[in-house]
Amino acid sequence: MNLKIISLVYALLSLHKASSFPLNKRSCEKTYNVIKGDTCYNIWKKYGLTETEFKNLNLGVNCNNLQIGTSLCVSSSSASSPSSSSCKTFYTVKKGDYCYKIWNAHGLSESTFRSLNPHVNCENLQIDTQVCVKTSSTSTTKKATATATSTSNSSSCSTHYTVVKNDTCYNIWTKYNLSESTFRSFNSNVNCENLQIGTQVCVKASTPTTTTTTTTTTKKATTTTTTTTTTSSCSKHYTVVKNDTCYNIWTKYNLSESTFRSFNPNVNCENLQIGTQVCVKASTPTNASTPTTATTTTTTTTKKVESSVTSNASPTFTWLRECQTENNYALSFDDGIYLYDEDLLDLLKRKGVKVTFFINGNNVSSIKTESVRNTIKRAYQEGHNILSHTWSHKDLTTCSSDTIRSELKLLEDEIYAIIGQRPKSIRPPYMAGINDSRVINTLQSYGYSYGILWKIDSRDWENKGDINTILHTFKTGLATSHRPIILNHSFYEGITKEKLLTLVEKEIDYLSSMGLTGVNMETCIGHKVYRNSGEGF
Ligand SMILES: [Zn+2]
């Protein structure tokens, strides 16, 4: 291995770390340094930004783990006009992701990905981080050249190790008593995700020396052009007031959800701003299909995927992470029904809290089991929602459309036989498919309208019964939203009745102390979560 290259790469990495900042810092008019007790939510509210604006200004910031001292952009010179740096497509990091996988999946080179996401730490990629995978427009691409000079301490290698079959970086750094970061600093150009037999890796440094490197890096700057979208001309507007939700507005004006959305394709119902003008009546009363052309800029986030807007009220598919109404929360439990859900129902009854179960038909337990069926029936009767987590917990992106169909239908038929309802809401296992238009279109074609994600992941499965750690994660997450959907599990490896009940009780008590109310998903999202009779398969 060429040690000069290692030094150079390390120097670059150090430089990158020291200067890591949001992509568009260049156009940032005002920055704010995070202090103790800050949350993203507080910051964007304070500066009058929407969540989307804030995230666009601060790509890669992990709001679930906001670090004191982080410099955030809170005002951009380009806030009201097309920005050179607005991200067109975000991708939300999910379990099992790593940068390599993400840039490959989106057809990006590593350098493009990194230039889009200078703030993202690929070595410690946090679930739920939003990363940019596409900018607004690449019609004009300018190259800017920056020269950077840095001085960095780097180490020469005194001991090498040759990778053999079945080695992993983890095994190697553990074997040589190195921390991961030390190992990586010795081996910056080793790809741990695809470690090749025969590679020489460094496992011991010689006396540190100081090297000075001067290098030139090239970054891509992209400019935005406006996009053209088709919308209906509006004859009546309504101005959003405090406590309004899209649901309230379309109900008030006797509109269907899809009609409302077709009138207001750019309105973000998840974060409806007071003062927003929404359209509640089209200019052509007989039919809303007179399209006019309006020039607007659109910002797409992966949080919500809307189908193309058409005049014949075609169904939409929407991903949701939060309740429509402030101060409601929705606890949800995946992967059941399992052994302790009866005890959980007792606890929920005592606490007066409604929740949602995203169940499988055949995973850790079988829905054909009498006790499982009884628990489902009881949960439904007690006001909880029973929704789909697929028949056998498959990654839907790996399934053919036929397999997706059977994953939905098998479970629906069994749920229908028990509670007389068919879910039209789903939480896809592993969050897989949230950026996959084939999966989304397939779900939609089978009548599914809502994909229910979450704002807070308790990470109960990872911290198995370590209540303090789980609650810390939970409280940090809660700081970003006062209407969160929350992910828990009915089953994970090592779960016990005590672990489940202790966690849920503490969560509920904490949420109550914040003045929040636990509701089922239907109340939370303000939409029907089951099909009308006659709909569906
Ligand atoms: Zn699951």
Image: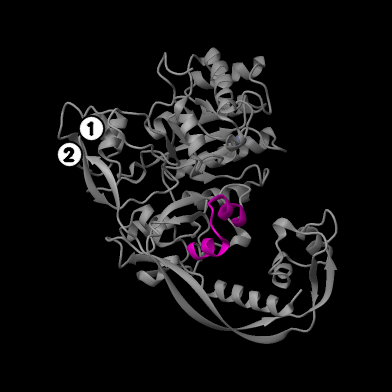
Q: Residue 51 colored magenta? A: no
Of residues 459 and 199, the one drawn nearer to the viewer in this rendering: 199
Q: Percent position (x, y) of residue 193?
A: 70, 56
Asked whether the viewer can see residue 514, the reply is: yes
Secondary element type, mark 1: loop
Q: Using residue 20 as the reference point, say whether residue 313 is left or right of it.
A: left
Q: Is mark 2 within 8 Å of ligand 1?
A: no
Locate the N terminus by quadrant. Answer: bottom right
Task: Give the residue type that dot 2 points to.
Answer: Cys
Give the residue pinned by disc 1: 289
Overall secondary structure of the magenta stretch?
A: helix
Q: Is residue 205 above or below residue 72?
A: below
Task: Give the residue type that dot 1 points to.
Answer: Ser
Quadrant of ligand 1: it is top right
Q: Which span is picked out in magenta?
A: 99-116
Q: Percent position (x, y) of residue 299?
A: 36, 51
Q: Percent position (x, y) of residue 34?
A: 45, 66
Give the residue pinned by disc 2: 234
The local crowd at label 2, few if under 14, some if 14 to 19, many if 20 or more residues have their Cα within 10 Å, is some
Total number of numbered labels? 2
Asked whether the viewer can see residue 520, the reply is: no
